[in-house]
Image (tube, rainbow, N blue to C red):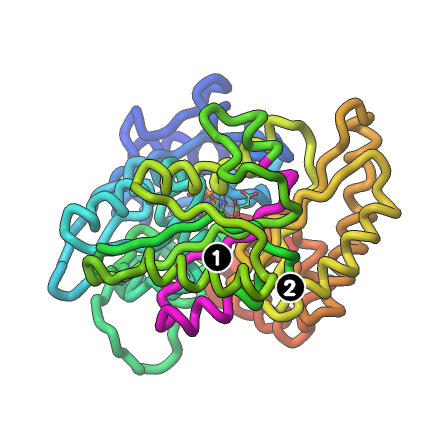
Amino acid sequence: MTPTATELRARLREILGADGLLTTDADCAPYLTDHRQLYQGVALGVALPRTVAQVSQLLSSCNAQRVGVVPQGGNTSYCGGATPDESASQLLVSLQRLNRIRSIDPANYSLVAEAGCILARLQQAADEADRLLPLTLGSQGSCQIGGNLSTNAGGTSVLRYGMARDLVLGLEVVLADGRMLDSLTALRKDNTGYDIKSLFLGAEGTLGIITAASLKLFPKVRDVATAFVAIADVRAAVTLLARLREASSDRVSSFELIPRVAVELTTRHIAQVTDPLDRAHDWYVLCELSSSRAADGLEELMSTALSAALADGLVRDAAVARNERERAALWKLRESIPEAQRKEGASLKHDVAVPVAALADFLARATPWVDAHVPEARLVAYGHVGDGNLHFNISPLAGADTARFLAQAPAVRRAIHDLVREFGGSFSAEHGIGRLKVDELERYANPVELDLMRAVKRAFDPHGIMNPGKVLRA
Ligand code: FAD
Ligand code: MLT
Ligand code: ZN
C-alpha cells in the first residue's frame, strides 16, 4: 500500500468514524462484484457515510489526493457501474447508511428522501401517506433511489409516469471537490437558467454523488384491471396498446411483452408461477389499466376491449385478474423473468429500444439473424412494449457449451446494436452504460453529443475522480 493510501485511510477514519470504513477483504467482498458477476473489483476501502457532511469531506479528501471514487447504491445494476476497477486504488462509497426519509408532503404531492433509501420503502411510505410513488422495478426490494436516479431507471410504469428522471423535482448532490449543490426544491416550475440537476440523472456517479432527492408523488391507484393476453403476434401487441389507450382515456399504466419461452422459464424455475392460460401461445402481453378513481369500471372496460380485439383477430385468449391475489400472480410471472433466465444459465443481454411502431419489424429482422448466427441458443425477447424497449436476450440451449456460447457475445452485440441503429434506436434503453458499454457509446453516440459529454465531465470533475472509466473512457 502506498503511503498516500495509508494517509487517506487514516483521514477517512477521522471523517467517518472507526466503523465507517471497511478495509479487510472479508468486509469489502460483498461490495466488490456486480449483480451479473461480470466484474470483480479490488478497492482501497469501502466508505459508509451516515451524513451529507461526511460525503462532502470524503470527496474533498479524495479530490485532493486524486483518488477515484465509485458510488454504490443497491448494486443491482447491469453494466458494472457500481464496481471499482482491479487496481485497489479506488474508494467505494456505499450510500446504504444515508437512508432517511426527510419529509413527505401529501398536499404538494412530493417527498424528500436520502439516496440510500430502498425503493420499496419509499413506495410504502408514499402509500401510507395516501399517495403513489410510481417507479416500479423487479429489483425494488434492494435497489436504492440514488441508484435509480443515477441510472435513470425505467421499469414497468414508464408508459404512464415516465422514467426516473421525470419524477424528480429537486436534488442534493455532493460534487467531486466536496461542494454541496443544494437544489432540493419541491417546485413544479423553475426556469432559472440551465437545468443543472438533470445532468446528474443517468450520469451513473460520474459527475457527483446524489445524497437526496425531492420526488413527485401521484394520486393513489384505487381501481385497477390487469390482464394476461395471448396475442396473434408482436404487431398485434402494438395495435392493441394503441386501441386500449384510446378506449381507456389513456389509463394504460403497463404494457409488457412476454414470449412463450419466458412462461416456460418462469414456471420451471420460480416457485408458485403457473401458466395463466390453458393453451400455449407464441406471444403474450401483461397489460394493466389503473385509475385514481374508485370503482372506475376498468375491469369491464378491459373485458370489452379484449373481446373486441378477440373478434378482430388481434387477441387469441386472455385471463383477467379477478382479485389482488391473481393480479400479484400475473406480475410475479413478469417480474421473475430475469431471475428465471439467470437460473437457466448464461445469457447474452441487450437492452434496446426502437420506436414503438417499429418493434415488430425489428423483431422480424433480428430473430432470423439469431437463428442463423447463434447456434445452440434461443431468443428470450421481452420488455416494455409501451416504451419500445426490448430486453433482447439470448440463452443457450440445455447442454450447450457455455464458454463457447459466451465467446460469441461481442459479435452478437455488434450485429444487434448495428441493426438497432438502422431502426433509429438505442443500444441502452434503461440499464445505462457503466463499464460494459463504454465502447458502444463511443461507436453509436452522436459525436457532437459525445464531445459535450466529455466537456461536462471536465467541468464537473476536472481531476476525473468520479467513477473513472464508467460511461466515458478514463
Ligand atoms: P447501483 O447498481 O448500486 O448503481 C448504479 C449506478 O449508479 C452506478 O454507476 C453507481 O456508481 C451509481 N450510483 C449509485 N448510487 C449513486 C448515488 N447516490 N449518487 C451517484 N451515483 C450513484 N432497471 C431498469 O431500468 N428497469 C427495470 O425494469 C429493471 N429491472 C430489474 C430487475 C432485476 C431483477 C434486477 C436485478 C435489476 C433490474 N434493473 C432494472 C436494473 C437496476 O435495478 C437499476 O439499474 C437500478 O436503478 C440500480 O439501482 P441500484 O441502487 O442498485 O444502483
Ligand atoms: C426487466 O424489465 O425485467 C429488466 O429491466 C430486465 C432485466 O432485469 O434483465
Ligand atoms: Zn426492463
| Residue that label 2 marks | 235
Q: Residue at x 48, y 50 (%)?
A: 286
Query: Closer to the camera, 342 or 386?
Result: 386
Residue 298 in sight in this render: yes
Q: Quadrant of residue 447?
A: bottom right
Instruction: Give coordinates of residue 96: x percent, y percent.
Output: 33, 36
Check disc 1: other Cα within 10 Å, few if <14, some if 14-19, many if 20+.
Answer: many
Side of 33 relative to 100 (left or right): right
The residue at the far top in this view is: 26
User: Would residue 430 be counted in the magenta stretch?
Assistant: no
Q: Residue at x 21, y 67 (%)?
A: 186
Residue 1 x/y as whole percent = 55, 26
Q: Nearer the viewer, residue 126 or 189?
A: 126
Which disc number belongs to residue 255?
Answer: 1
Q: Confirm whether residue 205 shows in the render.
A: no
Tell me what residue is drawn at x 22 percent, y 72 percent.
187
* Position of residue 70 measured from the top left corner of the image (x, y, whole percent): 49, 43
The span picked out in magenta is 241-263
Q: Secondary structure at mark 2?
A: helix
Taking the magenta stretch, the answer to whether it contains residue 252 is: yes
